[in-house]
Image (cartoon, rainbow, N blue to C red):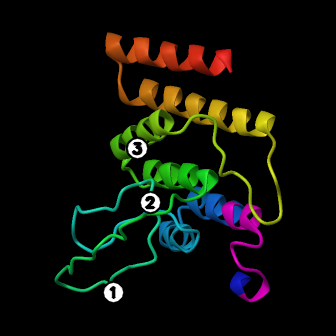
Amino acid sequence: VHTLVTEPSEDLDSWLELVTLCRKERMHSLCENTLRKLGAPLLLRKNSDLADHPFASSSKETVPSESPREVSLPSAPVRANDRVMLSTFEYWWAIGEKTRALSELSEYLKVCGVPNRLSSNTRKYNMAEATMFRVECLLKRADWTRELNTNEGAVRETLSTLMEAREL
């Protein structure tokens, strides 16, 4: 119904609010479909552990079937919006793929400095807002690391992440 009113490219903020609501209400199928519509990198084939790279967005998908079919990735992938990526990590966490969510968020933070793809057609973000977004990602990583790991190395990693966020 929402598609009849506005496209994701025209009102990303509202679409991300829908994703958050679906995730919190445990409507995971609708959350996944909405994320996919926003360009989130989700599984390319059904019943398989092959996923496209989390920092690439592809419009190529397969129709779910009993036997998975391989899909080729585009040669020059386009990275999804940073806020869509964070929502994707939160979705993975919510459906129980916690290790994946943490590792992909950590990899994302290594690859990306201060995000530059936060803006949408309706709202532009300044450098201060982009820095706050990175701090939000770092705090989420610290929280997830603390929840998943209780060993001494994880404590150091959590403290290191918190210090990085504090310095920003």
Q: Which residue is mark 2?
A: 56
Q: Residue at x 51, y 55 (%)?
A: 88
Q: Residue at x 21, y 81 (%)?
A: 69
36 relative to 96 in the view: left or right: right
Quarter of the figure that contains the C terminus: top right
Q: Amino acid at mark 1?
A: Val
Say what secondary structure mark 2 lies in: loop
Q: Are marks 2 and 1 in contact (CB under 8 Å)?
A: no
Compared with 12, 131 (above or below) is above
Decide which of 104, 76 is in the foreground and name it.
Answer: 76
Label placed on residue 95: none
Quarter of the figure that contains the N terminus: bottom right
40 relative to 167 in the view: left or right: left
In three-dimensional space, the C-alpha distance between marks 3 and 2, rounded to whole angstroms, equals 12 Å
Q: Amino acid at mark 2?
A: Ala
Q: Which residue is mark 3?
A: 104
The magenta span reads 4-16
Compared with 147, 38 (above or below) is below
Q: Which numbered disc, 1 or 3, marks the residue that appears first in the sequence?
A: 1
Q: Which numbered disc, 3 or 2, marks the residue that appears first in the sequence?
A: 2
Decide which of 90, 25 is in the foreground and name it.
Answer: 90
Q: Are marks 1 and 3 in contact (CB under 8 Å)?
A: no
Q: Amino acid at mark 3?
A: Glu
